[in-house]
Image (cartoon, grey):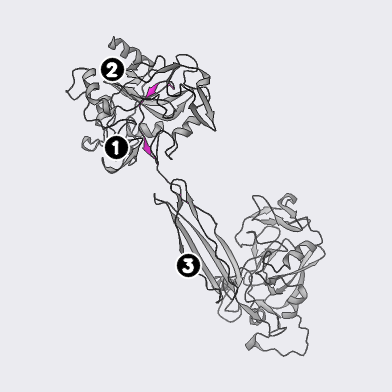
Amino acid sequence: MLNILKILLGAMIVFYFSACGSSSSGGISNDSTITHKGITYGIVTSPITGKKWLDRNLGATQICTKSRDDGNFSNDGEYVADQKDCFGDLYQWGRLTDGHEKINYIDQTQNQSIDYDPNLTIDDNGIIKTTGADSDKFIISPNNPWDWTDKDGNGSKRVTQWSKTDGTSICPNGFRVPTIDELKAETIEWSDPTMIEDESIGRVKVTNRDTAFKNFLKFPVSGFRSGSDASLYVQGDSGRVWSSSPDGSNGHDIHFNDFNAGGNWNSRAHGFSVRCIKYLDTVPPVLSHSTQTFTTTVGTPLILPTVTATDNIDGNVNVVQNGSVDFDTAGTYTITYTATDSAGNSASITHTYIVYGIVTSPITGKEWLDRNLGATQVCTKSRDDGSFPDNDTYVADQKDCFGDLYQWGRLTDGHEKRDSSSIDYDPSLTIEENGIIKATGADSDKFIKSPNNPYDWTDKDGDGSKRKAVWEKTDGTSICPVGFRVPTIDELKAETIEWSDPNMIEDESIGKVKVTNRDTAFKNFLKFPVSGYRYYGDASLGNLGHYGFVWSSSPNGSNGQSIHFNDSNAFDSSSKRAYVFSVRCLRD
């Protein structure tokens, strides 16, 4: 009778083999233990893939110590009696631990079964589980759907629950049910065909039940429980191990007997063994803040944010802060926040603090930032002081004093960075929100190219009055630090190209220098660089080391007003608002 049964079962199962293998280092190492539902499991490292696994089937109270084929047993019954404690539980595919999995291998009595009924299971927020008085029973399903539930036809919800690593599924915390590829890679299908077997460390390819035991996972031949009648079959003869992978309306598994081993699909109503794999955590913690830049002025400290981090496995993790800010000294400071989880995955963000110095004009007595907005240092050399043979040399040496480049009237949103990406003009890219014109959507950090009408980055503020009002805010919600704003064209000209007092005498030692070209723009107390611009038509950077362009907050028709300077002259101009120029802030 047993031989007939084996033939019938063999006809039902499609085996497939591969002469592959996989390279790795390490052998059977008991790295640690973990206790789950009253059973303490060892953790073994694969000598084939390097991954970590439980040392026994789920529910087993001991590791298997003998092979069915080592000569100790004259029949299957003797083997079962001796090794039953390493067999473990038998789960229906994708089902949670609810009692249905329990088996008594000696007298072949097991938890009671019940005929399939759709009312026996529910979908509870994506979790498929049994319900009611019969929730611990093995569900027999000899006909369509050949499954213990009808709530998850494609198996995706049960894949999710068997893949959980938080201890709420069937595996211990940090472990999950392996995929079919992961299970096969350790047993029947090695990925490296050159790998050499070594039985002493369990590096053994599974080709039958004896090699299944000699493999580092030490699989028993614990049989299975039929989804058709709930009976136990082929104990001591065959082993079947579920994966978390579905196959159509079935589940994927591996199985092995006295003459071969393979992978196959089977009815999800069957009860097979389960072996758990340790979740390989490659996901770093998530920090509560992103990398960003903060600006302020000397003597105006900012409150440093409290940066926290959460991890998908460890929950809240510690954040290490490196760096500090001296708000009493002009300069650029960085603080790095780093969080590392127990698996060694790290995430970092950097907060850059630009503490602007404040300079008092020797021309008007007004106070200004000591550098262009976004610059990390004050300029130290003129393009024309004899130090630079060409523009490229000047740019390489002085680039840190150039600063950002803004489209007229636009907020700080990322577009101002010299290497920001660009996008073609579209009215839908910008919105008006309570009088504030701003970019919106996934492309809100991009330079908006506008080579044609309206030659502007937005159509929401034709006369420019709304953007003028935004750039003149002094509460820190615009682009300048608290207490500062973008100057009008008259204020900018009064410090540079058009002094109000024609009798004023220049004094280069204190920066009282009228701007007539790029050299005098540097000698002026504002120490302007020739930092170029980005063209509104194609977003290209131009005139670096040759021209300087500085916006004012003043509109002029459909344009914005600015000052320009090059190697031979300096002047004010009305420019397309889609251009990006430098900005220098004035204390209000």
On the image, which quarter does residue 188 sit in? top left
Picture coordinates of residue 9, whole percent (x, y): 35, 15
Residue density around tag 3, few if under 14, some if 14–19, many if 20 or more, within 10 Å: few
Q: Looking at the image, is mark 1 or mark 2 nearer the viewer?
A: 2
Name the amino acid, label 3. Answer: Gly
- Labelled disc at residue 77: none
Q: Secondary structure at mark 2?
A: loop
Quarter that holds the N terminus: top left
Quarter that holds the C terminus: bottom right
The magenta segment is: 267-287
Q: What residue is pinned by disc 2? A: 107
Q: Earlier in the sequence, mark 2 or mark 3?
A: 2
**Principal secondary structure, stretch drawn in magenta:** loop
Q: What residue is pinned by disc 3? A: 323
Instruction: Say whether marks 1 and 3 touch (CB < 8 Å).
Output: no
Q: What residue is pinned by disc 1? A: 194
**Disc 1 and disc 3: Cα gap in Å?**
50 Å
Q: Earlier in the sequence, mark 1 or mark 3?
A: 1
Position of 77 compared to 527: left or right? left
Residue density around tag 2, few if under 14, some if 14–19, many if 20 or more, within 10 Å: few
Looking at the image, which residue sits at the far left? 71
At x 47%, y 20%, the residue is 147
Name the amino acid, label 2. Answer: Asp
